[in-house]
Amino acid sequence: MDYSRLDRVRRSATPMELDLVENFAQGKITRRQFINRATVIGLSLPAIGAVIAACSSTPPAASAPAGSPAAGGSIKVATQRPVSIDPVGMQDLSGYGMVSQSFEYLCTLNKEGSDIDKGLATEWTPNADGSVWTFKLREGATWMKDGSPFTADDVVATMGRLVAAGNAGLKGVIDDKSTKALDASNVEFTLLSPNGNFPYLVSVFNPQSVITPKAYETGTTLDADPNGTGAWKMDSYNPSTGAVFSRNATWWGGTTPLDSLEFLFFDAVGPQVTAYQGGQVDCIVQFDVLSGEGLLTDANTNVIATRASTHRQIWMRVDKGQFVKKEVRQAFALSLDRPKMIDQLFKGRADLGNDHVIAPIYPYFDDSVPQRTRDIEKAKSLLAAAGAPTISATLHAGQLLEIPDLAQLVQSQVAEAGFNLTLAVEALDPFYANAWCPSDPTTKKATNPPCVLAAELGIVDYGHRATPDVYLNAALKTDGDWNSSQYRSPEFDSAFGDFQKAIGVDAQKAACKTIETILNEDVAVALPYWYNYLAGSSKKFQGIYSSALGQMFLSAASQVA
C-alpha cells in the first residue's frame, strides 16, 4: 500500500469520494466495483488511477486482440416482438432495444456491458451530500431529423415529460422544477432528497430516460417520428415482422462500421434459435438455457453471459383477496423449491432469490438475512393458522423465455402445500394490459393508484438494473408505478429513503439489510432466482455488447475480415 499516494487523493476528496476510496483500500469492494462507482460519482480518472496504483501493484491483464474489422454490410438481429416503441411509455425489453438504436442517454453503457459510461453527458458531479448533480453535455451531438444541435433545453424538456408520466425510476426523486439549464451545455438537477445513485436513473438502466427533442410530444412512437442523436436511423417498422435501421451519417460518434441493421421479430425464443442455427439471423438479443442450450457450446457463437439482477417477481395482491394475510404469502414462498427451479430452468446459471430485490451482485447486498428454503409442513401450518388450508387462484404469466415453464413449476410445487392454481399464460401484450398493470378502461390512462386493477396473482419479468432503485421505487414503494401487489409499508418506504440518501457502501449495506429483512418477512412478491442474462452472435461479427436489459449495442459492430 502506497499511503503517501493514497493520502494525496484523500486530501482533495469529497465525503462521498472519500468513503469510496476507504472501502476499496480496506478490501470491502472489488477493483471493478471501485472503478464503476468512482465513475458514477465523478471521481477524476487521474484520481481513480492513483488509488488503484496505491492499493495494488498488479497490472491489469491484457485483452486478446480483436479480429480485423471489415467496413460495410448489414447484420440481422432476432428479438422478441416489441409491445411498444414509445420512448416514454415503453415497458418491455424489446421496446427498449429498438428505441436505444436511435435515442441516447445522458449515461450510456460501457463496452464491457458492466456499468454506465459517458453518453450525451461527458461529466457529472454531485455536491457533498448528493442532493445536487451537475451534468456537462456532449458538444457536437445533433438531432438526425433536422440537424439541430442537442442542448440543455432538450434535457430539461425530457425530464419534464418523465416527471409528468410518473417515470418508474425518477418518481419521487425529481419534480417538474428540479432540472435547470445552466447554459446550452450544462444541466443542474436539484433532487427532492440526496441520492448517491442518481446517474443510474438517467442512464441506460432506466430505459425510458432516453433524451428526446424539446418539441417531442408524449405518446409519439419512434416509427411515427424517426429521430434521435444516436448511431442508427429507423427506415421502416412493421410491428409484426421487424424493423430496418440505416447509419446516421451525422452521428457524433463517427461512422459506424456497418451500413445497416435489420431486426426480425419473434413471439418465442425457440424459433429465434432455429433461425440463428439456420443462418437466417446473425445474433439473438436474448435467449434462455432451455431453448438455446446448444448455443452455449457452439464454436461459431460468441455468447454474452452476464451475471445480472434479471429476475421474475411473483406478485400477490396484499390489499384484497386471498393473499391479504402475510401468513398466506409466506406459505406460498415456503412452497417454492428454488434450487430445483435453477437446475431445471437454467442448468445452474442463476443465483438463489430470497423474496427481496437486493441482488447478490450488488456491493451492498447483505448475506446475513437467512435464506428462505422449502418447508411444506410449515407452509401448511401457516395456511391453517390463516384459516385457509387451501387456496384456489389463477396464476397469470406472459409468454417470455422460461416464464411459461416457471409457471408450471410453481403450480406443481405449491400444490403440495394446498395452493390449487390455474394457469393463464398469454402473449405479452394482453398480459401487460390486462393482468399485470391495467390502465383505466375509461380514460385509457394509468389508474390512481397505479396497478390497482392488477390480477390477484402473477409472474412478471424484470430486466437487469445496475442498482435496485427502479425495483424499489416502482414495484414496491407505496403507489409505485409497477406496484401490482398494492404493497404499502411505511417501514419499507422509510428504509428505501435511507438507502437513497446513504453515502458510501457501509451506509448502503445497512439500509439494504433493513430492506431485505422487511421484504423477506412481508413477501409482497416472491422472488425465486436471479438468472444470468444470455445473448449470442455469430463469430462472423465483433464489437457487439449488451446491457442485459434488452439493449444490444451495435454502433461498434463489424464483420470480421
Image (cartoon, rainbow, N blue to C red):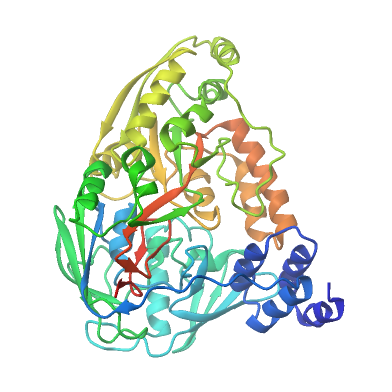
Tell me if residue 115 comes above or below residue 269 in the rendering.
below
Q: Is residue 474 left or right of residue 503?
A: left
Looking at this view, name the residue that lies furthest to the right.
4
* Residue 508 found in image quarter: bottom right
Q: Position of residue 444 (x, y in %)?
A: 24, 48
Residue, x 49% and y 11% (percent of image)?
388
Q: Is residue 91 visible?
A: no
558 displayed left or right of 502: left
| For residue 198, side relative to residue 81 (left or right) | right
- Give 194 or 107, whichever is nearer the viewer: 107
From the viewer's perspective, is 228 left or right of 413?
Answer: left
* Residue 28 in the image, given as x and y percentages of width and height: 75, 57
Q: Relative to residue 182, is residue 491 depicted above or below?
A: above
Q: Which residue is at a point 49% across and 30% down the rendered structure image?
A: 318
If the image is split into quadrants, where does the C terminus sit? bottom left
User: Is residue 256 visible in this depiction of the protein?
Assistant: yes
Where residue 284 appears, as percent x and y from the top left, is 30, 55
Residue 398 x/y as whole percent: 30, 38
Q: Residue at x 26, y 47 (%)?
A: 273
